[in-house]
Structures are given as structure tokens and as C-alpha cells.
Image (cartoon, rainbow, N blue to C red):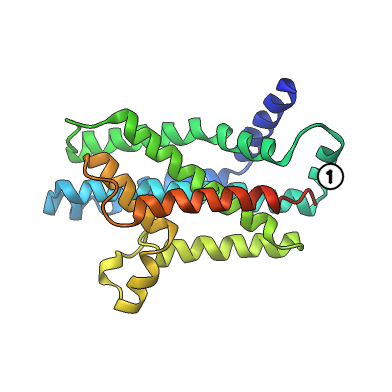
Amino acid sequence: MLKMKLGLVKYHILALAREPITMFLGFGLPFVILFMQSNLINEFDNALGLDILLGILITMAITVLCFNDSAYSHAYTRQIKFLRRLRMTPVKSWHYIVTGIVSRIAVLIVFVATMIAVLTVNFGMDLTDRNWLFFAVIVIMTFIMFYLIGMFIANMLKNAKMSQSLSMAVYFLFLTLGGIMFPIEIMPDFLQSIASWLPTAFSISTLQNAWTGTDIFYGHYFIAMVITTVIFGVLSVKFFKYE
């Protein structure tokens, strides 16, 4: 069984490595956006702005990893009947999901460490009084939440092709309305009410609070993130489809 689980981890890593566009969008695009805004960042020299920007860029990378890679690829493997073989093995659906999470955490941590290094060296972000372990735990929790959401969406519909389209639609919804591309504060009031309850809002706020050492229980974001993770964890296992 251990050998099978390690094989699944290897499969997930290879699936990610075979998608160079996903790698660029997930890990290259945040750096492109960062340097495009470098003049604006240097002009204002706002420490709080850097803390918020870090949460936004990490959330951007995670959503790409969980929707453009994990969810989209899983729907594709359903479509080509690749996962059908797993039914003949002792591997359970939750094994597939957990190994998918494990296989990408190391990649995500490398991205986060590189982003923090760039923000520190190029923009002078302050690294004093940071709870690194706590922040790493929140980053991983955030990734798990989005991964489970992505897996549920990839399995929710019977038609795998439609699941791919739905994954992309949800990704662009989060990107545009969830506080990544546009600040929630500048949106009309009715959109702010919607956006503040999207998982991307949970992620950005909780990551910022964990990074700055402020109360993560302020507002509804952390509790909502935990509840969302539990709900979609159950749903992603219940609705898991091999084809």
C-alpha cells in the first residue's frame, strides 16, 4: 500500500511537471505582476501594502495550482478513462486526494519562500517578529481548502468535459471577484457582500493576519475557511469519480 501511495505522489508530480503553462501561470505570473507594480510599490513604501500583496500573490498561485492544474487535470483523466484502473487496486478516493495535496505542498512552499525573498531583497519587506511556523501552517491550510474545492468541482458533474469548463469558470470568478485582481474595498456594496464570502477573501485576510501576527479570529474569515475546508473535504470524497 505504501508503494502505491508513493506511486500516486509521483504521478501527481509528473502531472504538474507536464503542464508548463500551469507552472508559468501559477508560479511565474505572480512575479510578473509584482515587478509590473514595482514603481507603485516603491512610491508608496507601504509596509501594510506589502503584507497584503504577499497574501494576494500566494492566493493567486494556490488557485492556479488547484484549479488550472489539479481540478482541470483530474477532470481530463476522468475523460480519457485513466482513473478507471484505480478501481482495480486497493487505492481509495481519499488516498488520491491526500497524495495530490502532499505532492504539491513542497512546490508551494518553495514558491512562497522565493516570493518572500524577492519582496525582502527588492522591496525591503520587514521580516522581524514573524511566526514562521504558524504562517506555514496557514499557507498549507489555505492550499488544502482550495484543493478540496477544486477536487469537488472536478467531480461534481457526470460529464468530465463540463467539469473542466466549470473549474475554469470558478477560477476566473475567484480571480476577478475574490479580491485578487481588484480590491474588494473598491467594489460596489452588493459585490462587496458577495466577495467577502468567497474563499479567496478568506485566504487573503487569513494569510495577512498570520503574516503580521494579528488576530486571525478577527472577522469571519478564518472560521469560514475551516468550515469550508471540512465541507468540501467531505464532498470531494463523497462525489469522487473515477471516470
At 44% across and 48% down in the image, what residue appears? 226
Find residue 82 and report its horizontal and vertical position in percent. Answer: 80, 44
Q: Taking the image as drawn, is residue 33 in sight?
A: no
Compared with residue 100, is residue 146 higher up or lower down, i.e. above or below?
below
Q: Nearer the viewer, residue 25 or 49?
A: 49
Q: Is residue 77 visible?
A: yes
- Residue at image location 42% in from the left, 31% down from the top: 110
Number of other residues with Cα within 10 Å of mark 1, as a class: few under 14, some 14 to 19, many 20 or more: some
Helix, strand or loop at label 1? It is helix
**69 to the left or right of 228:** right
Which quadrant is home to the N terminus? top right
Q: Quadrant of residue 187?
A: bottom left
Q: Is residue 211 left or right of residue 233?
A: left
* Label 1 sits on residue: 84
Q: Residue 194, image x and y in percent? A: 39, 71
Residue 175 vertical placement versus 6 (above, below): below
Q: Position of residue 230 (x, y in %)?
A: 53, 48
Q: Name the foreground residue: 31 vs 90.
A: 90
Number of disc labels = 1
Residue at (84% x, 44% y) in the render: 84
Q: Is residue 49 above or below residue 178?
A: above
Where residue 14 appears, as percent x and y from the top left, is 65, 34
Horizontally, residue 99 falls left or right of residue 88, namely: left
Picture residue at 20% right of the left edge, 32% below the top: 127
Say which amino acid is labelled 1: Arg
Residue sitting farthest toward the right: 88
